[in-house]
Amino acid sequence: MILFDSHSHIDDKNYDNDLDDVIDRAENENVQGIMIAGVDINTCLKAIKIAGKYKNIITAVGIHPHDAKDCSKENIDTLIRLAKKNSCVKAWGETGLDYNRMFSPVKDQENCFAKQLEIAGMLDLPLIFHERDSKGRFYDILKSEAPESRKGVVHCFSGTQEEMFKYLDLGYYIGITGILTLKERGAYLRSIAPLIPENRILIETDAPYLTPAPQKNKNRRNEPCFVKSVLLRLAEIRNADPDELSQIIFNNTKTLYNVEF
């Protein structure tokens, strides 16, 4: 079995005291790649520093919708410089819309999102998308500004079957987290996950959040090694061989992020 955690935040302060051990545990579970997604300037800088220390770690730079109020030209220009300067930067994000907690106003979120779509296209980088409770607005923006060449992943997908197919029709990957493993919260996702074409699935932890079962019973903090539980549950509900599915998803992730490990 070969694994790639396609979305994590191991730059989080929760890992400051034991990141070496976290990476070792991931390697012991044959996690051969880890993506650290940025959410603001500071996290992007820290992620790039981590990628310089450990092998097979890549990063994305971007501004999360929660931080869209800080989407200034200065910050965007800084992220562009980081993307151009550092070979570990393989994607732009995470970016999108989040109308659930509303840490940034709708107008700021939409303007920041549209700007980042433009920049990712300019830099020819795939996108890592965040969407929550946008009531179709996220899709509308993607659809209106969606060149056929754009690549990306809707990370931590937990939407409807209709939304899933819309994203697939736009050519995007679907990122599956530990939500899939949770008895009640993951029930609907388990009902539609078998419908995703095998060449369009990614798996992720979103660590330190969304710890999967069974680890959730003992660990509040998620980490990349737990992505194996997502893979095993996904293989179970798809009636797939875990080793074969892991290789397919590993290759999907390498293709999206244009990496060779």
Image (tube, rainbow, N blue to C red):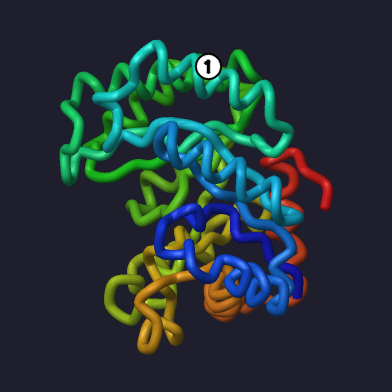
Task: Classify mark 1: residues with Cα within 10 Å, few (<14), some (14-19) or many (20+).
Answer: some
Whether residue 242 is visible here, answered yes or no, is no
Q: Residue 130's spot in the image, x, y percent? A: 39, 42
| Residue under pointer 1 | 119
Residue 239 location (% of width, % of height):
62, 78
Q: Quadrant of residue 216?
A: bottom left
What secondary structure is found at the residue carrying circle 1?
A: helix
Residue at 63% x, 27% y: name it. 125
Q: Could you tell whether 165 is left or right of 21 in the image?
A: left
Residue found at x 62% / y 68% = 20
Residue 213, placed above or below residue 84: below
Residue at image position (29%, 71%) is 185
Q: Is residue 113 left or right of residue 19?
A: left
Depth order, front residue of 111/245: 111
Q: Is residue 205 shown above or below 89?
A: below
Q: Is residue 117 above or below residue 199?
A: above
The image shows residue 9, relative to residue 101, as above or below, that is below
Q: Quadrant of the N terminus?
A: bottom right
Specify whether residue 93 is in view. Answer: yes
Which quarter of the picture shows residue 60? top right
Q: Quadrant of residue 25?
A: bottom right
Residue 51 at x, y = what percent? Answer: 66, 48
Q: Nearer the viewer, residue 135 or 101?
A: 101
Instruction: Say whether residue 93 is left or right of residue 91.
Output: left
Number of marks: 1
Q: Residue furthest right?
A: 260
Residue at x 28% of width, y 45% of height: 132
Q: Check disc 1 and give the amino acid type.
A: Ile
Q: Nearer the viewer, residue 213 or 183?
A: 213
